[in-house]
Image (spheres, rainbow, N blue to C red):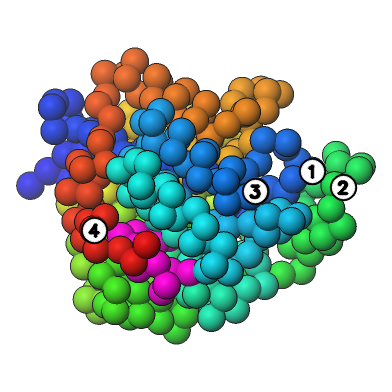
């Protein structure tokens, strides 16, 4: 039987690439780029435009509209989730990672309210350093930003076995939500295999391998190949692979992964640039760029309906927004 790598890399009409767009995240701050969507109106507009550009999955965090700080408030999520759903057919993927310092109740609040088709699920605790991103900023727009960025020298993104199981049981078993399983290092793949072996998660897995976050695996091509080999050995044909690379590595590793059979993720959560020294003015610009690259490689872009079928999602009519 062909391995998942071989099956996904074979050319042909059945090879469709899911483009995920992570619209705002909780990593970058307003002082880093004027183009970061903050208000519900901005997040809705950016999400719809990204879907129109070719993203079949939209990954979402929320921001306090007054100053752009990450917020878990489900009332803020509900100011943009229905608008996005009403204006495009993209799969809406809500974070369970939230932001450093958020409690489990914070991180569950919006997903349990919305009951989405898809949620992110981090597969392990880790150092998550973004302090280097603020080294060149001298004038901070809001007073929370510098402390938030510098604070990542001393904080841990917590995702214990108990926490992961709670997300799976309350969202997966309780709401019919499936997961974008975010793996920042090799050990996270083994943690995912643990939950699969216990049958708490069921195939097909959507495995997002993440490169270039300080505290996780690096961005060397061999890092990508090693993650792929390990995932293929652990999961065989039971998963769909996706690539997320931080910062300037976003497009190059996504392209490399796509040639090896991967789906891709872009968006201002992961990189604020479109090219060397060039800030991306919108999420749609990044989606359009990776779409053009994929199509020039003779790869087909998955529609939202095709993404739902590939990932066995419950459907947009089964959400609570």
At 63% from the left and 73% from the top, the residue drawn is: 102
Question: Relative to residue 309, is residue 118 depicted above or below?
Answer: below
Magenta-span inclusion, residue 258: no
For label 1, the SS is loop
Residue carrying label 2: 140
Q: Is residue 226 visible?
A: no
Residue 32 location in percent, x, y? 75, 41
Q: Alpha-carbon distance for marks 2 and 4?
A: 42 Å
**Image location of residue 128, percent across then percent down:** 64, 60
Residue at image coords 63%, 57%: 63
Q: Give the mark toward the camera: 1 or 3.
A: 3
Real-space CA distance between mark 1 and mark 4, rounded to the nearest whole angstrom? 38 Å
Q: Earlier in the sequence, mark 2 or mark 3?
A: 3
Q: Which residue is label 3 attached to?
A: 38
- In magenta, the rendered stretch is 110-120
Within 10 Å of disc 3 (Cα), the crowding (few <14, some 14-19, many 20+) is many
Q: Residues within 10 Å of mark 2 (few under 14, many from 20)?
A: some
Q: Which mark is residue 31?
A: 1
Determine contact: label 2, label 4, CB under 8 Å. Answer: no
Circles 4 and 3, Cβ within 8 Å, touching? The answer is: no
């Amino acid at each position: 039987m062909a391995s998942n790598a071989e099956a996904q890399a074979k050319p042909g009409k059945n090879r469709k690439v899911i483009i995920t767009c992570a619209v705002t995240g909780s990593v970058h701050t307003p002082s880093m780029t004027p183009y970061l969507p903050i208000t519900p109106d901005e997040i809705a507009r950016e999400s719809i435009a990204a879907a129109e550009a070719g993203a079949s999955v939209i990954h979402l965090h929320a921001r306090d509209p007054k100053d752009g700080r990450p917020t878990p408030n489900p009332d803020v999520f509900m100011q943009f989730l229905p608008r996005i759903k009403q204006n495009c057919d993209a799969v809406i993927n809500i974070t369970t990672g939230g932001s450093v310092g958020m409690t489990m109740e914070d991180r569950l609040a919006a997903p349990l309210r919305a009951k989405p088709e898809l949620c992110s699920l981090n597969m392990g605790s880790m150092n998550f350093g973004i302090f280097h991103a603020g080294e060149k900023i001298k004038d901070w727009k809001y007073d929370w930003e510098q402390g938030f960025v510098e604070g990542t020298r001393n904080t841990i993104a917590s995702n214990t076995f108990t926490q992961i199981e709670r997300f799976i049981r309350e969202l997966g078993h309780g709401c019919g939500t499936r997961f974008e399983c975010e793996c920042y290092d090799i050990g996270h793949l083994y943690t995912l295999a643990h939950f699969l072996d216990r049958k708490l998660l069921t195939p097909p897995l959507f495995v997002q391998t993440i490169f270039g976050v300080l505290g996780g695996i690096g961005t060397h091509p061999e890092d990508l190949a090693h993650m792929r080999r390990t995932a293929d050995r652990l999961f065989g044909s039971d998963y769909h692979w996706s690539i997320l690379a931080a910062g300037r590595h976003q497009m190059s590793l996504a392209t490399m992964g796509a040639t090896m059979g991967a789906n891709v993720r872009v968006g201002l959560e992961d990189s604020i640039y479109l090219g060397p020294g060039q800030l991306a003015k919108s999420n749609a610009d990044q989606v359009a760029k990776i779409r053009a690259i994929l199509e020039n490689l003779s790869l087909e872009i998955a529609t939202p309906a095709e993404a739902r079928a590939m990932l066995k999602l419950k459907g947009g009519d089964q959400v609570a927004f």
